[in-house]
């Protein structure tokens, strides 16, 4: 008689949960996902209303290789599942102090852009690209492998890497080796906001973020990043994964410290292993009794550092805008704005912001002659200093005034659809601890083995995937977390699988060019 297949339950159908489901089901594990919301995708889902479609969260799709490899484990490919466009310009970055850069992956044109702003900095660009290519190559094993305890840190090639990583430097300090002008540096370090951090605090190893954009592209999946979640759901279901939407997990069941399943309103569900994709800190508080935890008790969670949050405005607007797909506006007093977010926990009068005008690339996201505008303003995570029930309306008006600086003026009368999400909404409606949209912060005290481990150290047969574990927040590394955690799970359950034994090594870019996508669809 064939052995009974191993059973895994995944809590949450975010990108981390869906990627884990695909990998486990491809290895022959019986997988059930329980998702509290009525749709899959988590923060990477779509808001759809009145003919408008917006991404709820991610809009920058970077480094497609990892998701492609996840799809390949299931016998398909990213190219076959999701049409994508590589953006050029990747984004416009405009400075409150004056000047702008239309960031392009064409190196010669990018040098011209830098020259227009600060001529002597142009020479640093290719040096930056070349040094960070070497750095990413050297870092790859650290990003693709689990970190369990100090031993794994000391064992790994990480020690050899230290001189290259400049561990005591922030991204901004590191960039001073290449660029004198503050604005040019900002063009290569604002990406630390992807981790919800200030570039003045974000460790310099994350300079690879902007490098990855230039080297591997900034992509727009047609239909938005939410379309990626739809494709992942489809592939998971094709493999036999059961996805139970609208069914929050109420608790993880244990025999001692060992997880044996979960409880939902429909009853108890047995599993050999439980994968937690729900926001890490919130899931611990809600689903695991405090007495079972050692390193991540409620008290210790409360003392950890968390990323910033975001105030969101989704606007369906009459008219089209001949403006770039992505615009990042850096506040006039950027340092003060960051201090407001991370130290003083107050709302700025002149905040930095980001606007996505996706219809310029993907007109199908809005009815004919209309546009979707997605506005993101980084703010403090939930803090007693800010009462969003009082600030919501005022801050919405401020956000509208701010985006006029990027060419989106006089919108009020043309707005046909509007939705606001505040940090309090992220906290209460989306179950994100303190509304910290990018999870635990990524300072050196909270990365590698100092993050909640992929094979969760406080419990048995519990694995963490998503932005709350190693390597961190952001779609490519979230997909990587799914590969790391499922590899450990398969090994622990003794499931024979290529995935369980092969380290992730491929360095080739497997995603074709936009023309190939267009041809395929
Ligand atoms: C506004 C914003 C912009 C972002 N922009 C980018 C970007 O441009 N590029 C990028 O790469 N990344 C971006 N990110 C970061 C990150 O990639 C996404 O947040 C990503 O969706 C996180 O994936 P995840 O798998 O960790 O968790 P989530 O997407 O949060 O998924 C977790 C799932 O668990 C579910 N859940 C929670 N509790 C329970 C429970 N008790 N029972 C069952 N289910 C539960 C949730 O409903 C959710 O569906 C952005 C994030 C935000 C919020």
Image: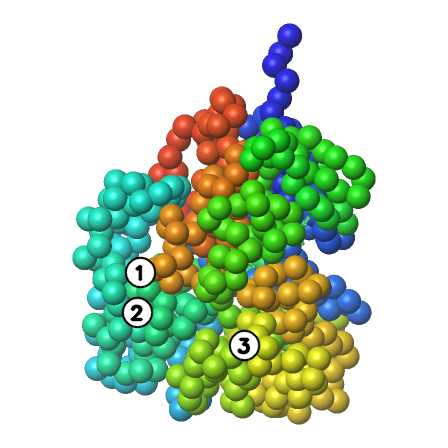
Q: Position of residue 295 (x, y in %)?
A: 46, 48
**Position of 497 relative to 390 (above/below):** above
Q: Position of residue 495 (x, y in %)?
A: 52, 23
**Position of 518 relative to 336 (above/below):** above
**Position of 254 relative to 387 (above/below):** above
Please tell me how many numbered marks the rendered image carries.
3
Judge left or right: residue 253 versus residue 183: right
Q: Which residue is mark 3?
A: 379
Q: Position of residue 207 (x, y in %)?
A: 33, 64
Q: Which residue is mark 1?
A: 205
Q: How much space separates mark 3 and mark 1, taking CA atoms?
A: 24 Å
Q: How much space separates mark 2 and mark 1, taking CA atoms?
A: 8 Å
Mark 2 or mark 1, which has the lower sequence index?
2
Mark 3 or mark 1, which has the lower sequence index?
1
Residue at screen point 71% across, 88% down: 412
Residue at screen point 40% across, 57% down: 446
Question: Which quadrant holds the N terminus?
Answer: top right
Q: Are marks 2 and 1 in contact (CB under 8 Å)?
A: no
Q: Which residue is mark 2?
A: 170
Circle 1 Cα neighbour tier, 10 Å, few/some/many (<14 / 14–19 / ≥20): many
Residue at screen point 39% across, 31% down: 502
Classify mark 1: helix, strand or loop. helix
Mark 2 or mark 3, which has the lower sequence index?
2
Give the colouring mode of the picture. rainbow
Residue at screen point 62% across, 46% down: 289
Q: How much space separates mark 2 and mark 3, taking CA atoms?
A: 21 Å
Question: Ligand 1 shows up in which quadrant of the image?
Answer: bottom right
């Amino acid at each position: 008689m064939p052995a009974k297949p191993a059973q895994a339950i995944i809590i949450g159908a975010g990108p981390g949960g869906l990627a884990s489901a695909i990998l486990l089901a491809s290895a022959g594990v019986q997988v059930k996902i329980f998702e509290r919301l009525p749709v899959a995708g988590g923060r990477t889902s779509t808001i759809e209303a009145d003919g408008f479609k917006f991404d709820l969260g991610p809009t920058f799709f970077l480094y497609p290789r990892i998701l492609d490899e996840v799809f390949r484990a299931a016998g398909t490919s990213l190219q076959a599942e999701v049409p994508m466009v590589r953006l050029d310009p990747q984004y416009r970055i405009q400075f409150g102090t004056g000047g702008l850069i239309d960031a392009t992956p064409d190196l010669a044109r990018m040098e011209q852009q830098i020259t227009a702003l600060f001529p002597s900095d142009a020479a640093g660009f290719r040096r930056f690209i070349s040094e960070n290519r070497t750095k990413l190559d050297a870092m790859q094993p650290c990003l693709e492998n689990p970190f369990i305890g100090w031993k794994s840190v000391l064992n790994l090639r990480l020690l050899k890497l230290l001189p290259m990583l400049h561990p005591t430097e922030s991204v901004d300090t590191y960039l001073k080796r290449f660029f004198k002008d503050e604005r040019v540096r900002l063009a290569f370090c604002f990406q630390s906001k992807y981790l919800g951090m200030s570039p003045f605090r974000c460790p310099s190893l994350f300079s690879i973020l902007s490098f990855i954009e230039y080297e591997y592209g900034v992509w727009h999946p047609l239909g938005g990043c939410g379309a990626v979640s739809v494709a992942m759901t489809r592939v998971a279901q094709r493999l036999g994964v059961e996805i139970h939407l609208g069914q929050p997990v109420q608790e993880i069941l244990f025999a001692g410290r060992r997880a044996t399943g979960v409880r939902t309103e429909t009853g108890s569900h047995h599993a050999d292993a439980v994968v937690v994709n729900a926001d890490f800190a919130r899931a611990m508080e809600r689903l695991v009794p405090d007495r079972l935890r050692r390193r991540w008790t409620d008290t210790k969670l409360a003392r950890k550092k968390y990323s910033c949050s975001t105030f969101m405005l989704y606007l369906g607007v009459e008219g089209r805008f001949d403006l770039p797909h992505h615009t990042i506006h850096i506040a006039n007093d950027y340092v003060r704005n960051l201090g407001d977010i991370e130290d003083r926990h107050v709302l700025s009068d002149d905040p930095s912001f980001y606007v996505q005008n996706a219809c310029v690339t993907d007109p199908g996201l809005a009815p004919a002659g209309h546009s979707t505008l997605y506005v993101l303003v980084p703010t403090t995570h939930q803090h007693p200093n800010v009462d969003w029930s009082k600030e919501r309306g005022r801050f919405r008006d401020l956000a509208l005034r701010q985006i006029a600086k990027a060419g989106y003026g006089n919108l009020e009368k043309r707005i046909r659809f509007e939705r606001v999400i505040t940090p309090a909404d992220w906290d209460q409606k989306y179950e994100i601890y303190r509304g910290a949209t990018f999870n635990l912060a990524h300072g050196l005290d909270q990365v590698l083995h100092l993050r909640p481990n992929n094979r969760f150290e406080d419990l048995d047969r519990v694995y963490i995937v998503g932005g709350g574990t190693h390597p961190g927040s952001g779609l490519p590394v979230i997909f990587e977390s799914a590969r790391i955690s499922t590899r450990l799970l398969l090994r622990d359950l003794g499931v024979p699988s290529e995935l369980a034994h092969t380290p992730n090594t491929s360095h080739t870019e497997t995603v074709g060019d936009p023309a190939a996508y267009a041809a395929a669809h």
